[in-house]
Amino acid sequence: MKKIIYSAVSVSMFLFIACSGNKEKAQEKIISSEEVKAESKKANDFFDRVFDAAVDRDPMRQSILGIKKDYDKWTDITDENAQKELEIVKINLDSLHSNFKLDALDEQTKVSYKLFEKECNNRIDNFKWRFHDYPVNQMGGLQTDVPTFLVNVHLVAIKQDAEAYISRLNGIKTLFDQLIVNLKIREEKNIIPPQFVFPYVINDCKNIISGAPFEKGKPNCALLEDFTKKVNDLKDASDVDKKQLIENANNALLKSVKPAYEKLMMYWNELAKKATADDGAWKLTDGSAFYDAALKLTTTTDMTADEIHELGLKEVARIHTEMKEIMKKVHFKNDNLSDFFDFMRTDKQFYFQNTAEGKEAYRVKAVKIIDDMKKELDKLFLTKPKADIVVLPVESFREKSAGGAFYEEPAIDGSRPGRYYINLYNMDDQAIYQMEALAYHEGVPGHHMQIAIAQELKGIPKFRMHGGNTAYVEGWALYSELVPKEIGFYQDPYSDFGRLAMELFRAARLVVDTGIHRKKWTREQALAYFKENTPNPEGDNKKEIERYIIWPSQATGYKIGMNKILELRENAKKNLGNKFDIREFHDVVLTSGPLPMDILEEVVNSWVEKKSKII
C-alpha cells in the first residue's frame, strides 16, 4: 500500500475517475510539425504553471516535494479554502478548452490533455462528496499525520529549518481547530465514524502527548525526541542556540500541541456518543451513489459493485486451486485447504519471535530481499530509479493502529529516500512466508520503482509525475509480486504460497469491500469470510476489515489494476510475438506516469501498433 501521509485535504478532492470530456473536432487544415511542437510546448508550460501554482498554495505539499518555501506553515484545510480551490479548477479547465486544441498536440501531450481534463472534471463532479469520508480514523488523519510529517518530512539542515519546525508546532492548535470544524460539518450530516474507530484515535492522541515535556521525569515524547536529535546535529548553531531552540520547542509543545490534542480528544469523546456499529457506506446520506462514485474513482473503470463482487469470488476460487498444488509440493498431511491455512497461521516456523531481536531480524531479512531483487532488475527494466529505498519499522506512537505495511515516496531533490514501513507491533501478524511478496510490493519492483521513476521522468508535465490512482499504483505493486516468480524467485514453496496468499487477500477484498458497503455485511460476516478463505492471521484480518470500512472502495483497486496490466501484457505478447520484450513493456507502463486504466490501454496499444510495423 502506498501510504499517503498528506491527508489534510479531504480525499474526495483527489478523486480521479474517467469522465466524458469535450472532444475536439478534427481540424480541416494540415498542422505542420513545427506548429505541433510549439502548441505542445505551450500546453506543457500551462500544465506546469497550474501544478506549480497549486503547490505554491499548499505548504505541506511543498515539504513533501522537498520545497522549503513555506516551511513554517500548515496547509489551510478549511472548507472555504476548498471552495476557492474548486473555482481555480474550473478556471483551469476553461483555459484548457479555450487555449488548446487536442488535434494540434503531439501524442504525449494529448495524453496530458486528456488526463488534465479528467482530473478537473473529477474535482468538479465529485466536490459534493467532499464530506463523505472520515478525516480522523485509525489508519491516519492529522492526529498521527502531523507528528509523522514532522518526524519524516520536515528535515532540519540549518537553524532556520529548526525555527520553522517550532513555528509548525505552534501552528498545530489552529490546524486542529480547522479539523474540528470539518468534523462538526460531518456530524451535522450524520457522517460519523463507526464505534470501533474512536478508541484507536484516543490512543493515538494520548501517545503523542505522553512523555516529556508533558510528563515530568519521563523520556521525551516522540516530537521532542525528534526535534532534539535534529537540532543537536546542526552545524550552523552554537550550543547556546541549540539550548534555546529546544526550550522554544518545549514551550510550543506545552502551549500549542498539548491543548490542540486535548481539545480534539474532548470533542472526539463527545462525538463517540453518537457513533453506531453500522459500518458500510450505505448508512451515509446518498451512500449508494457515493460508493458507486468511489468505485469508479478507485478502479478507473465502469465496473459495478456486483461485477466486482463476482470477479472476487471467481479469483478466490482460481487461487485456491493453485494453492492446492503448493500443498502437494510440501507433502501436507491431507488435501484440506482449511487445515493448511490453520497450519500456516499457527506454526511457529513461519513467524519471528515478538521481541526486539525478532523484529530486527525481520527488518534485516526484508532489506536482503530488496537488495537481491535489485541485482536482477536489468532482466526486467530499461528504466530504473535513482532514488534509494530504506526499510523502517512503523514508529511506536502509531504502530498499534497503523496498517501492516506501506510505502512513502522520496523527496524529489534527493534529500529523503523512499521508505518501506513494516508494522512490527505484533510479529504474529507478519508471516515470514509473505515477506518476499510484501517487499516486492512495497519496495522493488513495486511502489518504489513506480513512484520514484515517475518523479524522475523528463519530458512530461509535473502533474503526471506526482499524480496517481489506486488501480494503477496498487495494481502495479500487486503485479510486481508476480513478476519475480517469472525470473526464478520464490524458490521456497512456502514463500510461493505467501505470494498466492497475498494475491488471494486482494481477490477476497473485492468480495468483502462490496459486501460491507453494498450488501450490508457486518464485520463478523467479513471476518468469517476471510477466516474461511484466506490463511491470514485473525489480527491481520481485523485490521484489514477496519481499513475497508473507513476507506470505501480503496481495496478494490489492487486486483482490478493487476488484472488489467496482465491483460495488456498478454495482448501485447499475442500481437507482437517474438518482437515482445518484457523490458520495453514495463517501460511503456512506467514512463508515462500513473494513468487511469482506459488511458493506459490506449498508450500500450499505441506502442504495440507502432512496434508491430517495425521490420
Image (cartoon, rainbow, N blue to C red):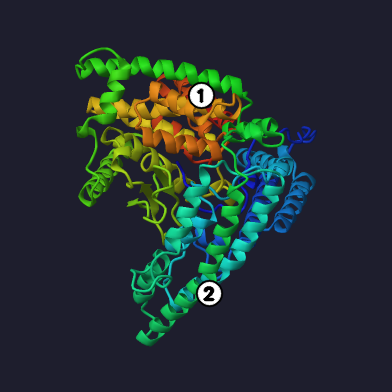
Furthest-top residue in this view: 335
Number of numbered discs visible in the structure rendering: 2
Q: Position of residue 234 (x, y in %)?
A: 37, 76
User: Quick check: marks 1 and 2 in contact, CB under 8 Å?
Assistant: no
Q: Position of residue 397 (x, y in %)?
A: 40, 56
Distance between the Cα atoms at labels 1 and 2? 48 Å
Between disc 1 and disc 2, whose residue precedes?
2
Q: Position of residue 310 (x, y in %)?
A: 54, 18
96 vs 517, left or right, is right
Report the amino acid beneath label 1: Val
Q: Is residue 263 above or below residue 530?
A: below
Report the amino acid beneath label 2: Lys
Q: Is residue 502 above or below residue 118?
A: above
Q: Is residue 548 above or below residue 211?
A: above
Q: Which mark is residue 255?
A: 2
Q: Callout 2: 10 Å neighbours few (<14), some, many (20+)?
A: some
Q: Which mark is residue 596?
A: none
Occupied quadrant, residue 498: top left
Residue 22 seen by the camera: yes
578 vs 84, left or right, is left
Occupied quadrant, residue 294: top right
Q: Which mark is residue 511?
A: 1
Q: Position of residue 391 (x, y in %)?
A: 32, 50
Q: Residue at x 43, y 76 (%)?
A: 158
Closest to the observer: 389 or 41?
389
Q: Residue at x 38, y 67 (%)?
A: 211
Q: Quick one: SS at disc 2?
A: helix
Closest to the observer: 459 or 281?
281
357 vs 407, left or right, is left
